[in-house]
Amino acid sequence: MKKREEIRHRSLYDGSVWKVIVLASAWIVLSTSLIGWMSYRITRQEVIQNLKTNDLPILARSVASQVEGRIGRAIETSRLLADNPAVEEWVQGGERDERLGLQVKRVLADLSGRYDYANAFVASGTTGQYWTESGEVLGVLGKDKPEDDWFFQTLEAGRKSNVSIDWNASRQDTFVFVNVLIGSVSRPLGVAGIGLSLKKLSEDFADYKLLEGSRVWMIGGDGTIWLSDDYALTGSNISDRMTDAALTQWRAGDPAEAYVFEADDLSGQLVDMIRYPIQSADARLLVQIPRSRTTGFLGAIANNSTAVAVVSLILSLYFFNYISRRMADPYQRALELNKQLEGIVEDRTRALADKNREMTESVAYANRIQQSVLPAEETLGGLFSEHLTYWRPRDGVGGDFYWVKRVRDALWIAAGDCSGHGVPGALMTMLSVSLLDRIVEQDPDASPGQAMSKLNVMLKDTLGQTAREGLTDDGLDLGLMRVCRGRAAYAGTGIVLFVRDERGMRAVKGDRPGIGYRRTPGDTVYTDHEWPAGADVVYYMTTDGVPDQNGGPKNLSLGKTRLAEWLASYRDLPLTEQRRRFEEEMSAFMGQEDQRDDMMLIGFKLKV
């Protein structure tokens, strides 16, 4: 018995087998190391390429749009001031009309007091008087005064308006000055305009920094840093912040075009930079990100690859030794192998269950986030006399949404169907709602068609879909309604508005081009439909997921005609009861058929 045990545990192979084991283990380690090294190189190249072609341009374009937006609003405000008939008549009359003077001074005071402008002014070419937002004459302009050269140069420049940006050392602030001619370009009566402080933008610049150590600067044509994420650097010159090699790169190429380059900074670190033009002023944006911050995580990959190679060598030696010793006992080997497989299956099953739970919890949390963007029931109850909402994303979250917002005396209502399902569609709804909020807040008097045209341009710019080629081709169908002073206006694309009044049920159709897609031209105009708003009129807007849903005995789509018939049959019911009836009929119609698309229906009566 003892002899049998000795034979059982005796080595079943000689030294040559050990050589094969070591050689095989070394080959596995070499293969693992090579794959790790290649993965490191490829990942590093892709990270740098993505930073230069995507992250930097998107960040620079976003920051530039903030600056351009501020300056653009200042230019528009200055034009409205200069083209004000009261300003033109008052200046032409030598500022002697007290009634017009009070009106003009009130406008100047409002621009400075109610908006974020540093100052507002009217400079008369008739009397030479410089009127400020305080309603007083700051002084009389003269050609013999060098500090007044800007006024006479503006009169003689032959342009309606010009913009200048200047760093004021005494105020420690950067100002945008917009000068607009009063009257015609050929016979100007004077100059009007505003001054805008950009100090707030420096605080915003700090929020745009991608990584620690990155920089965001706005630089003038003479190299002065007008704005910086570190406000202490504002007013200094870019030549003091860059090496000679980096300055050479900075000055290379067409200054009117975006330019990505890399160079060492003053500390000797390699940084990736983009120079981006600010079109409305003689300025350029510079965004700088240290390469070490971009590729820092790759060091962990290299360390992990080394650790994997060492562990692989140890495990390979142990594995080959273990298998070789068990080859003489097939039954024991089968039992051990079965035990290992059971353990692997159990671990995989547990891992899959954990992953499934994490994904389910993630989708549920995303659903709560998306629902928080939709108008609350309390909000809808305060804006409508009656309402119903039916929102059913196919994958927990989706691309359908409804949106309501009151701006001044106008009430806006929208129903949207963004491209994609699940999380991609939900991201598009968040972006679309954010842009709609911005559009109606900036221009509350716009018509629905005008608001949709602006949304088309902003969405294409945000997603980089202004060209025929791009990373995405996303957009949305939208029905947009505006109610103001007893009038209702509607524009839409891909969304049908059903109107039920004393004449019965009718459909208001929109236009064909979708919003934001690459194939949709940036100058697309959407048609406005307008009618008197009535308190007894019921409006319904739905996405195409409802009429396109299959069901019924023949498994055909519901269709817009049958949907309209359903809605018309509810005419004597309150909207809350209509929602219950609609859910019951839709559930019965679908039966066991899977939901094909995100579905959304909103109905409402106006408070008129």
Image: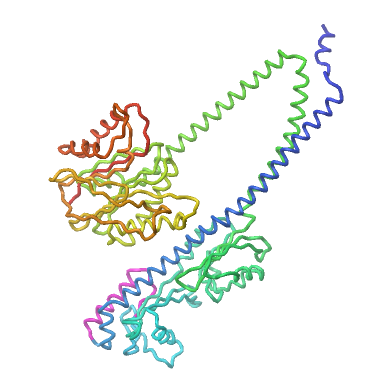
Q: Quadrant of residue 400?
A: top left
Q: Quadrant of residue 303?
A: top right
Task: Tell me if residue 440 can be seen.
Answer: no
Q: Residue at x 15, y 37 (%)?
A: 572
Task: Determine the residue positioned at 43% across, 85% down.
Answer: 153
Q: How many marks?
A: 0
Question: Is residue 362 highlighted in magenta?
Answer: no
In the rendered image, the residue lying farthest to the right is 15
In percent of width and height, residue 516 lies at 40, 53
Vertical position of residue 537 compared to residue 461: above or below: above
Residue 194, horizontal then vertical, whole percent: 37, 75
Q: Which residues are magenta?
A: 97-121
The percent position of residue 286, horizontal first and vertical second, equals 55, 65
Instruction: Give coordinates of residue 548: x percent, y percent.
Output: 32, 38
Residue 352 placement, left or right of 576: right
Foreground: 104 or 474?
474
Q: Is residue 46 left or right of residue 469?
A: right
Is 143 placed above or below 259 here? below
Q: Is residue 233 left or right of residue 31?
A: left
Q: Residue furthest bottom?
A: 144
In this image, 474 relative to 437: left or right? right
With respect to residue 50, does 91 lie above or below?
below
Residue 111: within the magenta?
A: yes
The residue at the far left in this view is 502
Closest to the observer: 175 or 547? 547
Which quarter of the image is occupied by the N terminus?
top right
Residue 257 in sight here: yes
Quarter residue 445 falls in: bottom left
Most frequent secondary structure within the magenta stretch = helix
Camera-side residue: 308 or 188?
188
